[in-house]
Image: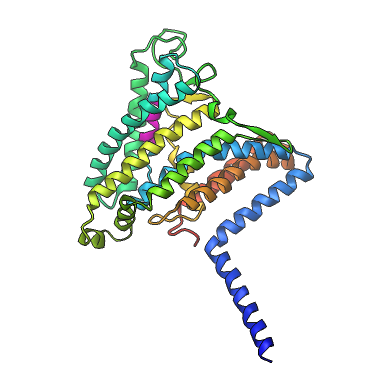
Amino acid sequence: MIKMENEETIQQKTRFDIAAALREFGVARIIILAFLLLLFVLALAKGLDVPGLITDSLVRVGMNGVLILAMLPSVVCGVGMNFGLPLGILAGLLGGILSINMNIAGWAGFFVALAIAVPIAIVVGVLYHMVLDKVRGQEMMVGTYLAYAAVFGMCICWMLFPIKNPKLIFAVGGKGLRYTISLTDTFGKVLNNFLKFRIGGITVPTGLILFWFLLCLLMYLFLRSKTGLAMKATGSNPVYAMSSGVNVAGMKRVGVVLSTVLGAVGIIAFAQSYGFLQLYNAPQTAAFPAIAAILIGGASLRKASVANVIIGAFLFQTLLTVALPVTQAMLESTEISEIARVLISNGMILYALTRATGGR
């Protein structure tokens, strides 16, 4: 009798643990994961190149991963989602342009671009925080307006940039930077090609994934340092943090600067994988997919973790990668499939941005 009761207790505890794990993972993410698996099943049924889709998904995850990670510091420090991410992206683009202008190729060109972009991003991040500090409680809205203004302002700067390198300027007129700048002869694909290998028809961009994971690991360790814990305290309860002797304004500054720097690093990693630097209006809406991804990964406007970044990157980017070819194969119309892809991608972004808290 006692043995039967013990078995029932164990079964009830097991069911409780499973239910708790499912609630922790989030119903929304379970639905998205199920939809993603359905897309892969449909891809197999339609005879699509599934290993190729997985390869493309891994590339998209890696190239967007750092931009998604850039959201984490701003959320942790209490500023919320960094809608001003294009400010950091502009710093990264500037670093990439100057590196190309020096005609530095390969790994050297990649690291020179980072070395130029990071100090610029630090300065931009400090100035950005100074603005946000004046509009406490409205950081996300002001960040959006500020990012749009900076992008449009830089459109003028790109046209007036004093560079004569034919790789960078318009062929006609010889003035102004091009809309799209190729990285083929400089640092294009340096991360993607590093230690890459094929398995079962899938090409794994090892260097790109490792670069993202390395930054995730560094962020994970940083958030467990004294400064990282102070940032968490500031984001969770600024009044309590202040009473404990934490410099709340200073911790928010660290979070904003770190987010801006990751934005600069992220766009260089993105560009080397994509093969091009895109200027002018290209960075304008870059924050929205990154925000949607981390929210879908389980973050909220006040709480986020490295795990949310990784889960969100894989779910969001893989779904975007697989949705277009599958809908095209199912609907047999390029125009309709493109509409379906836009509906799926923007529907996910809209869903993520309208959530009050992660996983609910």
Residue occupying the point 44% across, 17% down: 100
Residue occupying the point 32% across, 27% down: 153
Is residue 327 located in the magenta-colored stretch of the structure?
no
Closer to the camera in the image, 256 or 131: 256
Which colouring convention does the figure follow?
rainbow
Q: Is residue 216 above or below residue 283?
A: below
Closer to the camera in the image, 93 or 338: 93
Tell me residue 98's x, y (percent). Answer: 38, 19
Tell me residue 188's x, y (percent). Answer: 53, 23
Closer to the camera in the image, 12 or 84: 12
Query: Which quadrant of the figure has residue 44?
Result: top right
Query: What span is colored magenta in the figure?
Result: 86-94
Q: Is residue 244 above or below residue 350?
A: below
Residue occupying the point 67% across, 82% down: 7
Relative side of 216 to 151, left or right: right
SS assignment for the magenta stretch, majority = helix
Tell me residue 140's x, y (percent). Answer: 34, 47
Can residue 152 be seen at all in this image of the molecule? yes
The quarter in which the N terminus is drawn is bottom right
Tell me residue 330's x, y (percent). Answer: 73, 43
Q: Is residue 310 above or below residue 272?
A: below
Is residue 93 located in the magenta-colored stretch of the structure?
yes
